[in-house]
Image (cartoon, grey):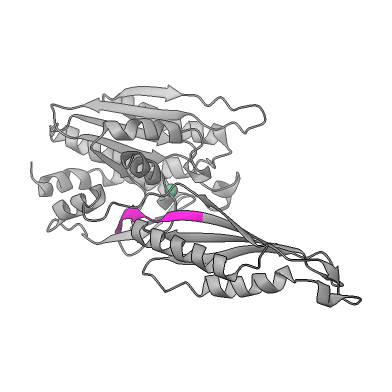
């Protein structure tokens, strides 16, 4: 089965795809609207069953005080042997209830609009349609395809994350079916994220009576902010943002304390270099009673020199009307979980 015939089979499903997209987009299904998310889950489950997948559906049981989320739907399809592929698509959006009534699905030429049409109902459906095209072509040269349809990606996948981490090592390739970048590039790596909190301790004093006894923590913070922001552009792909500064109590008091929150993003190698530099700089600049604290958030950068699944798929796509370009993205997605797990 060559790529052109597969593409023809896919093209024949265009009208059905648009109709399915309209059906899904016209449901308010923000992460905190579980009834709407479950309506999407019903559609996914029905589609799995119609096309011979094994289906598992897990309801969310929130801890006391936590919000109720929608269900997880997992489809499994067995082939005749070969690579095991994990597909991931989320069913939730970031939109509040009522958004569909405000701006329902519409088409302008060949472009679809509506809440979540690109993030990511189109991708979610593409997973189903792609596999259905393979089935029609009797192309079953895979070991297993697992498709995780999760209800909570837009809030950091608190419910589905552990399942994705569990499944990822049992598969050879993981594809998160989010839309490509605006220019068509495929995201094949994610930047790691580090959140830093810097606390600067100065010394309080009355600003009018004995200012010379004070040590102004805000002044020191101002120096640090300038120094940290100036790191932008120093290493390719590394971004630094001082996003929060909190300090001082009133105008007639020399501020005793200031807190800075810093977001550092980068690929792995640059991250190590930037973190070392960041530490050195703070040690050098901090007043004797200054201190620094850091917290590493899960990152998912691609291992250098090996190339992730994204890169391999692009290479295969070469010459078939598929873009080969890839992009290293600073945003967040479930692929962080598939990547982080395989690095262990
Ligand atoms: Zn998304």
Q: Residue at x 20, y 57 (%)?
A: 322
Q: Quadrant of residue 271?
A: bottom left
**118 or 199: nearer the viewer:** 199
Q: Position of residue 97 (x, y in %)?
A: 60, 44
Residue furthest to the front in view is: 288
Between 140 and 229, the residue placed more toward the observer is 229
Numbered marks: total: 0
Relative image position of residue 139 (x, y in whole percent): 13, 34
- Identify whether 6 is placed above or below 179: above
- Residue 122: x and y, percent? 37, 47
Q: Horizontal placement of 316 versus 298: left or right? A: left
190 falls in the magenta region? yes
At x 33%, y 45%, the residue is: 177
* Image position of 222 (left or right of 255): left
Q: Is residue 109 visible?
A: no
Work out whether residue 16 or residue 344 is closer to the camera in this orientation and state it.
344
Q: Which quarter of the image is occupied by the N terminus? A: top left
Q: Residue, x 44% and y 32% (percent of image)?
A: 162
Against 294, is 251 above or below?
below
Residue 76's place in the image compared with 246, above or below, is above
Instruction: Identify the magenta region.
Output: 185-194
**Is residue 299 shown to the viewer in this render?**
yes
Q: Main secondary structure of the magenta part?
A: strand
Whether residue 146 appears in magenta in the rendering, the answer is no
Q: Residue furthest left?
A: 1
Residue 293: percent from the left, percent from the top? 58, 54
């Amino acid at each position: 089965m060559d790529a052109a015939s597969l593409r023809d089979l896919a093209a024949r499903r265009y009208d059905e795809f648009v109709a399915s997209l309209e059906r899904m987009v016209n449901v308010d299904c923000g992460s905190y609207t579980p009834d709407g998310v479950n309506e999407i889950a019903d559609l996914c489950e029905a589609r799995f069953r119609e096309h011979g997948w094994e289906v598992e559906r897990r309801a969310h049981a929130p801890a006391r005080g936590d919000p109720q989320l929608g269900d997880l739907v997992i489809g499994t399809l067995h082939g005749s042997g070969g690579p095991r592929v994990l597909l991931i698509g989320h069913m939730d959006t970031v939109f509040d209830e009522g958004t569909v009534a405000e701006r329902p699905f519409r088409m302008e030429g060949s472009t679809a609009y509506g809440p979540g049409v690109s993030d990511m109902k189109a991708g979610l459906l593409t997973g189903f349609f792609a596999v259905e095209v393979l089935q029609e072509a009797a192309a079953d040269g895979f070991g297993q395809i697992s498709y995780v349809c999760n209800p909570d990606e837009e809030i950091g996948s608190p419910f589905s994350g552990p399942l994705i981490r569990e499944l990822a090592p049992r598969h050879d390739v993981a594809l998160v079916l989010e839309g490509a970048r605006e220019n068509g590039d495929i995201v094949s790596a994610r930047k790691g994220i580090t959140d830093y909190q810097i606390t600067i301790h100065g010394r309080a004093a009355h600003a009018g009576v004995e200012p010379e006894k004070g040590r102004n923590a805000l002044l020191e913070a101002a120096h640090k902010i300038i120094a940290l922001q100036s790191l932008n552009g120093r290493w390719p792909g590394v971004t630094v943002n001082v996003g929060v500064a909190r300090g001082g109590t009133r105008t007639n008091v020399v501020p005793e304390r200031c807190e800075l929150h810093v977001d550092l993003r980068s690929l792995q190698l640059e991250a190590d270099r930037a973190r070392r530099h960041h530490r050195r700089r703070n040690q050098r600049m901090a007043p004797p009673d200054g201190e620094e604290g850091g917290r590493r958030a899960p990152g998912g950068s691609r291992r250098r020199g090996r190339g992730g699944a994204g890169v391999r798929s692009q290479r295969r796509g070469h010459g078939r009307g598929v873009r080969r370009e890839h992009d290293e993205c600073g945003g967040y997605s479930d692929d962080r979980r598939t990547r982080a797990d395989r690095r262990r």
